[in-house]
Image (tube, grey):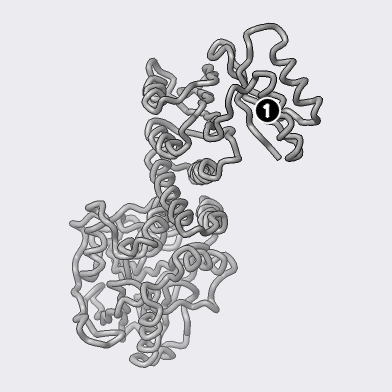
Amino acid sequence: MRKRYIARLPDQVGAFMKASEIVSNIGGNIIRCSYNKAVDVNTLFLDVTGSPSQIEDITTALKNSGYIAKEDISAKVLLLELKLEDKPGSVYPILELINNYNFNISYISSAQNGTNFQNFKLGIYIEKTSSIQEFLSKASEICEVKIVDYDMSEKYLDNTVFYMAFAGTVAEKLNLDSDGRHKLLLYSNVIMQALDELDKPSHKTFEFIGNFADCIAKYKGNAFNCKLYNISLAEGVFMYVIEPPVGACTYIIQKENQLLFIDCGFACYREEMINILDIMISGYKEMKKEIIITHSDIDHCGLLKMFDKVYVTQSSYNNFLAENSHEPNIRESKVEHLPYCKISKVMSGYKPPKMETLEIIGERDHRTPDALEYLRDIQLLGENFEIYQGNGGHVAGEIVIKCERLKVIFTGDVMVNVKGFSKEQHEFNLIAPYLMTSVNTDSKKALQERKALSKIFDLSKYNVCCGHGSVINIGNAK
């Protein structure tokens, strides 16, 4: 058992020795102490371990000796490490915040380290623990905050420290800027509060979020080992396929010096994708590039800012308009999904496209019952593409794209080729369903879409390009 004592020592020789003697005579072990005479001449913080009966006896003995005038079980101590700019006045906003919350400072330590920042260690004694979370949130808006030590007997504080430590670890792993760190902290707090209110354990959920971050970080740079191949669709028309270890597939149709992209993966792999495209497609940078998206999920739309023209449905347009207006997008409109979606955006570096680059291709009549409804034909690359819009089973605005002459169908996430997943893709695609209950907005409608896809088209006659997994029927399309 561990207990923290806030002892009041007389300012005389041997005061600490006597307190230590009391603990050791009863069989307790002092595992941490904090005392700074320059800050508070009388206060000593002791962390002691022992059996329940030993802790009870130590408490009684310290009280009888006058070292504990009264026991305030709500008082806690936090040892923080603040990353402050090495310039005059940088610590003042933090000190002002501490003063506003009426916290007492028990320890201060700081020194220059040869960088533009100082690691400022600060111990604070907190009597009103209900204000800890709010204080830490506001402190994190001022500078980067790391919790070094705290009283683990308080569940409320324990949860606060847990999500702050989690956010700090993920931010460091993904090299997030201060804004990214703050957003990650904010939405981690939202998730923790929601789980607390439902009395659900938090560690499993945060483990999956951590796994998401691990996957993102693991495949950066040279580790971005995509499966790459190309398919001849017709004379002078080629399709390049990029199957990443995480996220959606990217398809690029080349005809002469023009490129049409269908979806474009996660934003965090922008540099890796550009390097691949430079290698795969000779003269890539000089070519005209447009993109049509199957739907507005961030793993399909991360690189939209690379394109001068982006073809979208009205629903997808509305999704991006909401994001640019700092409003919840389609998926985030479900309150329980919002923090997970926000965290995914932060970790993947997603930014919404510029609205002036979007061209609306239409919107289905949502009063009709069809799972997949023909929307319109569109001419791209001098080829005719048929657009079919789904019922929103996966997400509102999703489409299926077919080119009859080229014998190719792009299904988006209406269909995924699970059998064509690599080991990395399989592991990554287990994460989202756990975090958000399901990757689909409405699983029943999503099933109807998949059935309609097979009913409307004889898929054996086409190269079927799914949102995730390898192309189906390569070489068999006629």
Q: Is residue 262 visible?
A: yes
Res. 376 in view: no
Where does the image place residue 68, in percent across and percent down from the top left? 62, 23
Establish if 121 lies above or below 434: above
The residue indicated by pointer 1 is 32
Quadrant in which the C terminus appears: bottom left
Q: Say above or below: 255 vs 49.
A: below
- Residue plotted at (47% across, 59% down): 198
Q: Along the line of sight, which residue is nearer the eye, 387 or 88?
A: 88
Secondary structure beneath dot 1 equals strand
In terms of image quadrants, where is residue 204? bottom right
Question: The residue under label 1 is which amino acid type?
Answer: Arg
User: How many other residues sit within 10 Å of disc 1, few (<14), some (14-19) or many (≥20)?
Assistant: few
Question: Which quarter of the rendered picture does the N terminus lie within?
Answer: top right
Q: Nearer the viewer, residue 142 or 159?
A: 159
Where residue 305 appears, x then y in whole percent?
Answer: 30, 54
- The residue positioned 40% from the left and 45% from the top of the image is 186
